Image: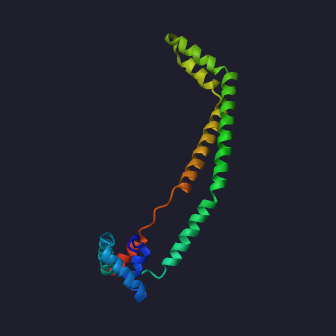
Amino acid sequence: MSDKHLTFDEWEQLNENELDSARRAQMEQHLNDCALCRAQAEYHQRLDLMLRALPRVSVPADLVARIEARVAHEQGRRARLPFIVLAMLLSLLVALWFCIELGIALQENGILDFWTLLNSYSDQFSAELVIALLEAIPLTETLLTLCAFLTVGVFAQQLVETLRPRPIGLSMVTNKHSSNS
């Protein structure tokens, strides 16, 4: 055993006195021969003493129920993920369709040519030209496109909220402090 160092499980068995006398004698002989394992044994003993000196905190009676409720809530949230992704992709396709329709409506109304004409004769800029430009804008297609992109944004936000891990609340800390008061 002098060529092989002690494992973590062996350290734990030695510290917890879970070894038979023959195995314990073997390990103690190895500790006498191996300076590295001896230093590790001292470290583990100090660590074990520090851990045992820590105050014990009682576990709330409803801890298991709260953990199970939290896990069930998270699983329910994650179960919606495929539907949110599908809805977001479909709304993105609708938004792109409305963008194409808006482009076609702008072209049919001649607003793109009108805008170019307006910019080229900026010295003759008047209120009538602006009103004519506003009248040529296809409002229905514009509003539908904006609503479609708003829908994409809402679904994207839901997707991010579903994927983002939720922080654990401070209810356990609050319960601990209130029981100490």
> Which residue sits at x=47%, y=82%?
61
How many dots with numbers? 0
Quadrant location of residue 140? top right
Decide which of 131, 40 is in the foreground and name it. Answer: 40
**Image point (61%, 64%), residue name:** 76
The residue at 70%/22% (across/down) is 108
Reply above or below: 170 against 136: below
Can residue 18 be seen here? no
Image position, residue 92 (x, y; %) = 64, 41
Question: In the picture provided, is 44 more to the left or to the right than 103?
Answer: left
Where does the C terminus fall, quadrant-wise? bottom left
Q: Is residue 136 above or below residue 79?
A: above
Residue 126 sits above or below residue 75 on the image = above
The spot of residue 98 in percent (x, y) is 67, 35
Q: Where residue 67 sits in the image (x, y, percent)?
A: 52, 73
State whether residue 66 is above or below residue 163.
Answer: below
Question: Does residue 67 show up?
Answer: yes
The coloring applied to the image is rainbow
